[in-house]
Structure formats: C-alpha cells, structure tokens
Amino acid sequence: MMQFNDSTFFYVCLPPIVFASGYNMQRAKFFKNIQSIVMFGVLGTIICFSIFSALTIMVKDMGFLTQYNGKTGEWSQLELTSPECLLMCSLLCSSDVIAAISLISYEKEPDLFSIVFGEGITNDAVSIILFNTVMKYTEKNSVISWSTPSDIALNFVSLGAYSIIYGVMFGLLSSFILK
C-alpha cells in the first residue's frame, strides 16, 4: 500500500530540511569561510566521487567484488555494471558530519564549526546532484564511453545552476512572506 517515491522525497520532504538548516545557520561565519566550505564541500566531494568511481570500476573489472549468500553460505561473484558502480559511488561520496559537529563547540571554535557545518551542507547538496545526474546512466541501454565524464560534468553544472536559481527564488519568496 505504501511505496517510497523519490520525487516526493526530493521535492517535498528534503527542501524544508535544507531550508531549516540554512535559515538557522550563522550566515556571517558561513560567508566568511565560503572559500574553504566550497573547496571541501564541492571540490572534495567531486574528487572523492572520481576516485571512488575509478577504483570501484577497476576492482570490479579485476573480479575482486564478491557477495555472500546468507541462506546457502556461499560466496559468489558480484555482478555490477559500470553505471551501477557510478551510482553507488555517488551515494558513498556523501559524508555525515553530525558526529564531527557534535564534538565542536560553536562558542569555542566558531570558524571551525561553520566550516564543518557548511561543508556538510554543501557535500550533501553536491551528492544529491551527483546522484540525480548519474541516475540517467543506470538505464538498461546506457553505455559508458569516454564522453561520459564530460556529460556527467555538464549535467552536474546545469542541475546545480537550476538548483541555485530555484533556491534563490524560494529564499526571496520566503523572506518576503516571513518579513
């Protein structure tokens, strides 16, 4: 009767969570440290995704990925396509900063707290954009070629630009309504 709908999650459930995080953050510290936040949150996530993807596909091609069957107790070869490896790596490159944030006191280290918090927010946003971009390549007839990284980069930039435009529009609308 109930079924998970990713569109409902991405367009209805997730925006209020991100909005609340942005609304409650210390904006002055965030923008003071924007260069570090972008470097760690955006570039770090893209580099992590690229390295994870290359290594996972390489390990898969070497035949080192195995799976365990709990019912039979046997190990077998894990069959993943390259697009599925990319999709899995787009999920793995997201880091959870809750543990790190809980160890940092905002009163003692406001800059460090802002950098870690901002990196977590941008890392999650970049991971969501990467996931949605790579999702196109998991269809049955999709083929990974030499042009795939540039296609992913182009789709990533366009989806990121649209996300920023929509975010600014709704941010201004919310500011007008709540002011």
Image (spheres, rainbow, N blue to C red):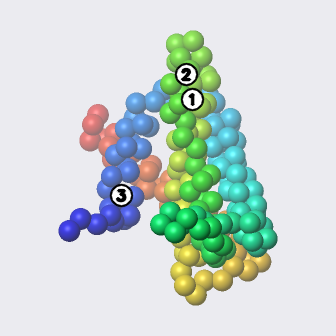
Total numbered labels placed on residues in the image = 3
Query: Residue at coordinates 63% horizontally, 37% vertically from top-left?
Result: 37
Q: Which residue is mark 3?
A: 9
Residue under the point 24% across and 65% down: 2
Residue 83 figure quarter: bottom right
Give the number of the mark in front: 3 or 1: 1
Can residue 144 be seen? Answer: yes
Give yes or no for contact between labels 3 and 2 (Cβ–Cβ under 8 Å): no
Residue 150 can be seen, yes or no: no
- In primary-sequence order, the first of circles 3 and 1 is 3
- The residue type indicated by label 3 comes to Phe
Which residue corresponds to the image point at 20% horizontal and 68% vertical from the top-left?
1
Instruction: Name the residue rendered at 72%, 69% in the picture.
Output: 60
Q: Are marks 2 and 1 in contact (CB under 8 Å)?
A: yes
Residue 103: which numbered mark, if any? 2
Label 2: how many residues lie within 10 Å, few (<14), some (14-19) or many (20+)? few
Cα distance between the residues tagged 3 and 1: 26 Å
The numbered dot on residue 100 is 1
